[in-house]
Image (spheres, rainbow, N blue to C red):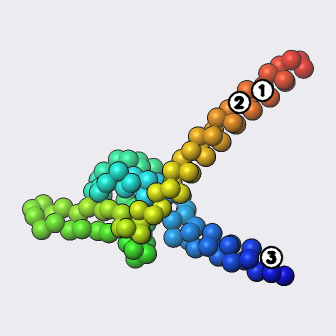
Amino acid sequence: MGQESSVIHDKCGVETTIAVVGGKWKPMILYALLSGPRRFGELTRLIPEITQRMLTLQLRELEEDEVITREIYKQVPPKVEYSLTPLGRTVEPILSFMQQWGEHFTNTRATSEGHSRDQRRDEL
């Protein structure tokens, strides 16, 4: 029973992480912000598949969770930059590991699929 409660406790941390930084777009937004502050237009160019509406929604959620900050510069035209908060910076090792794992997965699948194709070809 002690082990079960520990698994549930661990699962809560995973669920919280996924709720805050998971999904289709948030990891990509956060990854783009790792290198420094970005303007809205820069983010849309870096993530061309995301709609402006979805980017706005995701940025608002990340800001509400205090993972990113939105800084408005009083100039003409107005300038707004998004950057990681100190809390947001703590996600860097997670995103780096996800990047590495994604590359590993892609390479493993490519090797595996190539091997499978060769086997099927040999069987013919």
Which marked residue is nearer to the observer: mark 3 or mark 2?
3
**Can you identify the residue that label 2 sits on?**
111
Decide if residue 68 is in sight here. no
Q: Quadrant of the C terminus?
A: top right
Q: From the top left corner, tell me how far across and down residue 121 is, in percent.
A: 83, 19
Which residue is at 38% across, 47% downward? 46
The one nearer the camera, 18 or 1, is 1
Specify which label sits upstream in the sequence, 3 or 2.
3
Q: Quadrant of the N terminus?
A: bottom right
Under mark 3, the amino acid is Gln
Determine the secondary structure under disc 2: helix
Mark 2 Cα-neighbour bin, 10 Å: few <14, some 14–19, many ≥20? few
Which residue is at 35% across, 51% downward? 35
The one nearer the camera, 105 or 52, is 105
Look at the numbered discs 1 and 2 and tell me whether their residues touch, using CB distance below 8 Å.
yes
Under mark 2, the amino acid is Thr
**Can you identify the residue that label 1 sits on?**
115
Mark 1 Cα-neighbour bin, 10 Å: few <14, some 14–19, many ≥20? few
Which residue is at 35% across, 67% downward? 85
**Can you identify the residue that label 3 sits on?**
3
